[in-house]
DNA sequence: GGATTGCTTTGCGGTGGATCAATAGAGTGT
DNA sequence: ACACTCTATTGATCCACCGCAAAGCAATCC
């Protein structure tokens, strides 16, 4: 069976159709640009339904579990933590979102958000009303496809996290998170080796199924082994190769 | 902000638009019926793109990781295990699928299946070519919506598994899986208290992030405590309340 | 039937990460 | 500068689960 061709006209060089950088913050479409192929007219329509909200302060919620679902959201600047409550009332962090990423798609199935999301720092978030996106999608097939892909990607990422939680050691989990953040930084043309973690150790531990203490210990050990240098939330990856070894479990010491 | 109204004409009583039971196997649309509201003409169109494949034997693959993505699949009879490979080559079970459920949606994002799926027993699987579904969705808005919902549901379920793996003990994980299977049986009008597990202990352990031995020990303990009776793969839930306690971690002994 | 193979159960010792506790540091407001 | 609070680090102990090993049991094949 023949392989399906990639979406026609898909942007390939990390620029959107406005010829903006992926991480551009002036274009309202920024978070959607990368894999999107649209006619100019369609593009204007899409742009018109995206609402640019006021900046959110650290700790402010974008939406909360159980709230009526109306929109998905795109991060334009800052960072976001998504979490849900387990039956025992404890918090479970389900993901971190950085500029150019979409969140809130777990609310579609029941017309109600299945998780909460809050800003980890002062952030700019775009609101994309889902009903209008839905209508637009029926008229613009490539947009429909794009959203199917975004949701599918979310599924894939969740499954990767499942694998991480199910099979990997504390070292591997922390290494994998750092590499993931590093890669996402690179995608935004930012430094892949030095960055600031916007979330607390507690959030990291919660996300990775570890305690704060274990996360802290792993950071200390990694520093001692020369994989990276840690200054509270400032991380500098010193040896990517070793860090990859740590992530795959093949680190010697 | 007003709450979005539910999809107009949505089936509410567990019957599809052919007035079949949810679990009907004679209707090719069975796995899609429950939440679907379509005009008769649309229904025929949808039915015409769904392909009924030959029965799969136990162990046969529906698709494999890395294969070109062309279709999603609906289970009509039997059961399916989905799994992916971790970087170290070990297997990670990401889900079990029963009649009326859809799988393969993780392949959409990269036009390539992100996981493999195989029949756990002799099974009937419908193939739904995604390109044709895509076209159809642009013409039938409620179908588009329905597929968004299915994918969103997959995300929610993955996140529930993440919570399970991250925060819960072996007892809680096993109890949760049994309750999930029980609930899915009930949805198909089958017994919620007595059923046969189609998957091996190894699969269960792999899915839940536990070893075979631990799974086996938990089954034995649950039996000793009178929560259920276990005869290899035949499970009979003896005390649902206690099992729920076990799932929430409030089991006394 | 007997042998082979694969799956499940049970026992026992080891260990990675949780838990408890104490300290140190960073951030915030006065 | 101070006190106060929140977050991070480090140490010591403990336990749930893993890993190995052996035995029991079921299905399949010759």
Image (spheres, coloured by chain):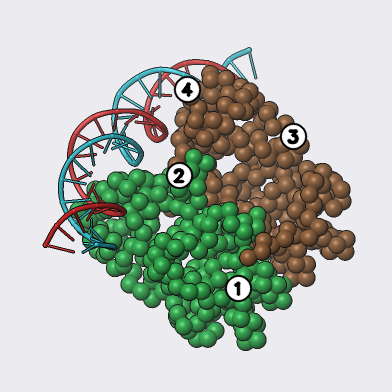
Chain colours: A green, B brown, C cyan, D red
Q: Are marks 1 and 2 in contact (CB under 8 Å)?
A: no
Q: CA distance from mark 3 to mark 2?
A: 33 Å
Question: What x and y, as percent, mark residue A185?
Answer: 38, 69
Front: mark 4 or 3:
4
Instruction: From this view, report whether residue B69 is shown above or below residue A219.
Output: below
* Residue A17 in which image quadrant: bottom right
- At horizontal 69% and vertical 62% (from top left) the residue drawn is B4
Query: Quadrant of residue A188 in the image?
Result: bottom left
Pick whichever of labels 4 and 3 is earlier in the sequence. 3
> Could you say where residue B118 lies in the image, as x and y percent from the top left?
63, 46
The x, y position of residue A109, in whole percent, is 65, 56
In space, the residues marked 1 and 4 are separated at their CA atoms by 56 Å
Mark 1 lies on a secondary structure that is: loop
Query: Which of the two discs, 1 and 4, sits closer to the camera?
Result: 4
Q: Is residue A83 above or below residue B145?
A: above
Q: Nearer the viewer, mark 3 or mark 2?
A: 2
Find residue A90 and name its label: 2
Q: CA distance from mark 3 to mark 1?
A: 43 Å
Callout 2 crowding tier (Cα within 10 Å): few <14, some 14–19, many ≥20: few
| Chain for disc number 2 | A
Q: Which residue is mark 3?
A: B190
Q: Which residue was labeled with disc 4?
A: B253
- For disc 1, the neighbor class at 10 Å (few under 14, some 14 to 19, many from 20) is few
Query: Answer yes or no: do the residues labelled 4 and 3 have beta carbons within 8 Å?
Result: no
Query: Both on one chain, marks 4 and 2?
Result: no
């Amino acid at each position: 069976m023949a392989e399906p061709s990639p979406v026609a006209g898909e942007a390939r060089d990390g620029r959107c159709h406005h010829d903006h950088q992926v991480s551009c913050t002036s274009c309202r479409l920024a978070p959607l640009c990368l894999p999107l192929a649209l006619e100019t007219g369609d593009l204007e329509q899409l742009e018109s339904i995206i609402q640019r909200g006021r900046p959110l302060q650290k700790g402010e919620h974008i939406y909360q579990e159980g709230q009526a679902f109306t929109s998905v959201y795109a991060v334009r600047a800052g960072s976001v933590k998504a979490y849900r409550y387990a039956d025992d009332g404890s918090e479970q962090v389900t993901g971190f979102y950085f500029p150019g990423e979409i969140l809130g798609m777990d609310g579609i199935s029941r017309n109600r958000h299945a998780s909460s999301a809050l800003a980890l720092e002062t952030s700019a978030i775009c609101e994309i009303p889902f009903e209008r996106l839905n209508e637009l999608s029926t008229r613009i097939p490539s947009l429909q496809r794009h959203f199917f892909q975004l949701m599918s990607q979310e599924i894939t990422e969740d499954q990767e996290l499942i694998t991480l939680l199910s099979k990997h050691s504390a070292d591997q989990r922390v290494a994998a998170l750092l590499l993931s953040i590093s890669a996402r930084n690179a995608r935004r043309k930012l430094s892949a080796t030095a960055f600031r973690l916007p979330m607390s150790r507690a959030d990291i531990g919660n996300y990775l199924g570890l305690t704060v203490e274990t996360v802290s210990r792993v950071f200390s050990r990694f520093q001692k082994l020369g994989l990276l240098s840690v200054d509270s939330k400032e991380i500098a990856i010193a040896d990517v190769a070793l860090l990859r070894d740590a992530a795959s479990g093949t680190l010697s010491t």
